[in-house]
Amino acid sequence: MTLPRDPAPASTATLPSEQQVALKLWVTLARAFAAVNEHAMQDVRDDGLSLGEFAVLELLHHRGPTLQGDIQKRVLVSSGGTTFLVDRLVKKGLVERRDCAEDKRARYAALTSEGRRLIRRIFPRHARRITSAMRGLGVSEQREATRLLKSLGVVAAAELDSGD
Amino acid sequence: MTLPRDPAPASTATLPSEQQVALKLWVTLARAFAAVNEHAMQDVRDDGLSLGEFAVLELLHHRGPTLQGDIQKRVLVSSGGTTFLVDRLVKKGLVERRDCAEDKRARYAALTSEGRRLIRRIFPRHARRITSAMRGLGVSEQREATRLLKSLGVVAAAELDSGD
DNA sequence: GTCATATATCTCAGTAATAAGATAACCAGT
DNA sequence: ACTGGTTATCTTATTACTGAGATATATGAC
């Protein structure tokens, strides 16, 4: 996947102070995300996976067979993107599709035994990689950052449907 | 651009506590980023810009004519991507290329008057949009989040060159 | 001056997605 | 049973880039 665009470090001297603070946070957030994301990508790349594919495998690993529509919602990917990712994983022999007894439109994706073996192998390594990437903060700082970003993210996401 | 993949909300009960904390932070960070990023995208989309294009315009607005190599570093885009973005902006009449007197290989990108008009118009709106998206946190919380994420991002980025 | 190496930008094949739209199935109201 | 609106997934054209490599230029050692 592509990295997020870096919001340029604007000379924002003419903006109200609160906007300057918000923009500075945005720049910093985007850069932090980009850096950790690159770690995540590097970690799965050697096993021939994109982050999207990894995310699907991980979801199936932890939740079991999942409707594609639910994968879509949890992995934050478009409808077509879900089909694309599942197709690719099916082609790699890591995932299979299963019919849904209750709804003929719907399809489950489930790990194959090969997919299970792979995710069992790489998930612990991935967790270590992310942990290592986060080590600029101590554990209590990480908890504090999580708390703050949770509030930020929930409100920002809630405003999306309502427009600006 | 694409949204980042949502790191799946792993059932990580078997992982060491510090890894659980780090993974939780990663999930939360990625989601917060995705949400604010979507705000940013929506804001510039109506003017026919991608976030990459907007980032270049903003950079040129605040820094003046900039070597393409410097754009590359500041906007976090590949070499080919820089050429792509500048090409598109040139085609839209918002940016022009200028030769560099000191180095015949290098080229500056600079805003046209049309590009200047556009960025002057949309940047304040964009700043307001980002500020609004951040309103899940108060100003002092935003400052705190910035401080934490700065540490996190700097260390995570520093580790990239050295591998995992 | 020569040459090996590094650097700035461009070119282009390829990638990972998006988003619009198609199709079949589902569901509630009549 | 029929109808119209909704939903789950798939299909496909399109997009925004990446990254390898090419080319011209710059640099520094000899």
Image (spheres, coloured by chain):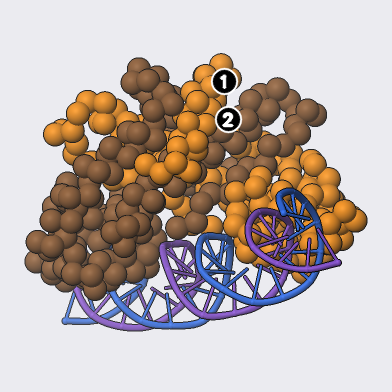
Chain colours: A brown, B orange, C purple, D blue
Residue A62 pos. (x, y %)? 17, 46
Out of B151 and D1, give the one closest to the viewer. Answer: B151
Label of residue A25 in the image: 2
Which residue is the site of mark 1?
B143
Q: Amino acid at mark 2?
A: Leu
Q: Tell me, yes or no, if residue B132 can be seen here.
A: no
Q: Secondary structure at mark 1?
A: helix
Mark 2 is surrounded, within 10 Å at the Cα level, by few (under 14), some (14 to 19) or many (20 or more) other residues, namely many
Callout 1: residue from which chain?
A: B
Which residue is drawn at the image coordinates 52% and 31% (left, top)? B154
- Of the pair C16 and A155, the residue shown nearer to us: C16
Q: Residue at x 44, y 41 (%)?
A: B162
The C terminus of chain B lies in quadrant = top left
Q: Amino acid at mark 1?
A: Arg
How far across and how far down the image is residue B1, in percent? 53, 57
Q: Is residue A141 left or right of residue D18?
A: left
Residue B110: in sight, yes or no? yes
Q: Is residue A114 left or right of residue A81?
A: left
